[in-house]
Image (cartoon, helix red, strand yellow):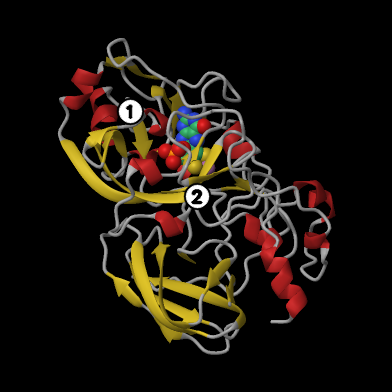
Amino acid sequence: MDRRSFLRLLVAGGAAAVLAACGADPGSDDAESVSPGQAEPDAGRRGWFKDTAPFIAHADGKSLEARLELMPSGLITPPSHFFVRNNSTSCSVDPESWRLRVEGDGVTWEARFSLESLRAFPSRTITSYLECAGNHRAMFDRVQGCAAEGTQWGTGGVGNGEWTGVALRDVLDFAGIRPDAVSVLLIGLDTESPEGGFRRVLPVGKALHPDTLLAYALNGEPLPRDHGFPVRAVIPGWVGASHVKWLGRIVVSREQLWTRNNTTSYVLIGDDYPPEGEALGRPVTRQTVKSALALPWPAELEPGPRTLHGFAQSPDGPVVRVEWSDDAGSTWHDAQVESADRYSWARFELAWEATTGEHTIMTRATDSAGATQPERIPFNQKGYLFNQPVPHPIRVA
Ligand SMILES: Nc1nc2c(c(=O)[nH]1)N[C@H]1C(S)=C(S)[C@@H](COP(=O)(O)O)O[C@H]1N2
Ligand SMILES: [Mo]
């Protein structure tokens, strides 16, 4: 890797303004021309309740990006370190008056649940990672040299939680879901969101999957307000946007539903993604296999033997293998992978001899289904699902 490319990787900025110029021109060097700054330590606008110290607080006031290097040991992310992504601001919901309404022509009758009545269904606990569809978005700029629209997430738009709740399937069965139901629309109570309540459509098959949860606890504690208290959806393996927080209403429909979040947002838009239905491209559903080193960007290390670690995740987990390369992918070595549950992220470790100079280390994960990170992923306008191996810049001095 030449010095110029290396410098480009050091540019921490996303360049939303250059979007119009982007396309299939990976050779263009516009990454250096615009650098609005990835984030500010404190955007000055509190859209969340938690202490922002361990995070990169993005200037949009809606995104707290985890610093993977600050994650405590083990596999479970404590709420203090769990990233936040809001489309407006975090909500405070009164659990006493909270009700979940289930309605629509796809159910036999309208059902209403208090928190207590919801908790009466059998509870399930699933360890699952939750990752924003835009996690790694800044890599379109940093690695491909073509910035995508939206919050310039580095590698910290992801966390791994132990979620407890009830199966959405049980709730839908209770409401008498009809055999010809097609779409299940989850609606949040954050009415300042676009559309008045953030919402996502689930195909009925995914809604009835036994692992699709309405969760009321994270890591054995009531959900924190920033993460959807009192109840949120958890859709293991699917993009963060489908994990609707502050859930208030579910509409079951016998027709395919289209909303902002499966037509213009959370849609892969680009030459490689032909439009589906009323969408501008292909709606994002499942996540893709990814890995990242738990290091600042760029990392600065002292010379000598170093043990580096990171996290890897896949919708078809667990991740069973992680390889790494410090010669731009010419040779790959196996990292040690700590085994994990089906939907959990995995932790990996590698021994590296840090020699004075500038380096990059790439990592590449493979899951139990054999899926691995591709050498290159085609550009999409909104920068979702970037999962080619990330060349992490490391300066040793
Ligand atoms: N009601 C509501 N649910 C929401 C959102 C939102 O803005 N409002 N953001 C979604 C997006 S885009 C992501 S990535 C995840 C983030 O979950 P977290 O903030 O608990 O990490 O929540 C999803 N659920
Ligand atoms: Mo997201």
Q: Is residue 2 left or right of residue 365?
A: right
Quadrant (top left, top right, bottom left, bottom right) of the C terminus? bottom right
- Residue 210 got which mark? none
Q: Is residue 389 left or right of residue 215?
A: right
Q: Quadrant of residue 118?
A: top left
Seen at 67% across and 53% down, the residue is 274
Seen at 73% across and 74% down, the residue is 5
Q: Amino acid at mark 2?
A: Gly
Q: Which residue is mark 2?
A: 157
Q: Nearer the viewer, residue 110 or 266?
A: 266
Residue 190 position within the rendered picture, expressed as x and y whole percent measured from the top left: 49, 22
Asked whether residue 18 is in view, the answer is: yes
Mark before the other along the chain sequence, 1 or 2: 2
Seen at 31% across and 19% down, the residue is 108
Q: Nearer the viewer, residue 162 or 200?
A: 162
Q: Quadrant of residue 22?
A: bottom right
Q: Which residue is mark 1?
A: 231
Q: Is residue 211 above or below residue 393?
A: above
Residue 61 position within the rendered picture, expressed as x and y whole percent measured from the top left: 59, 33
Q: Amino acid at mark 1?
A: Val
Secondary structure found at label 1: loop
Seen at 54% across and 75% down, the residue is 362
Q: Is residue 390 above or below residue 119?
A: below
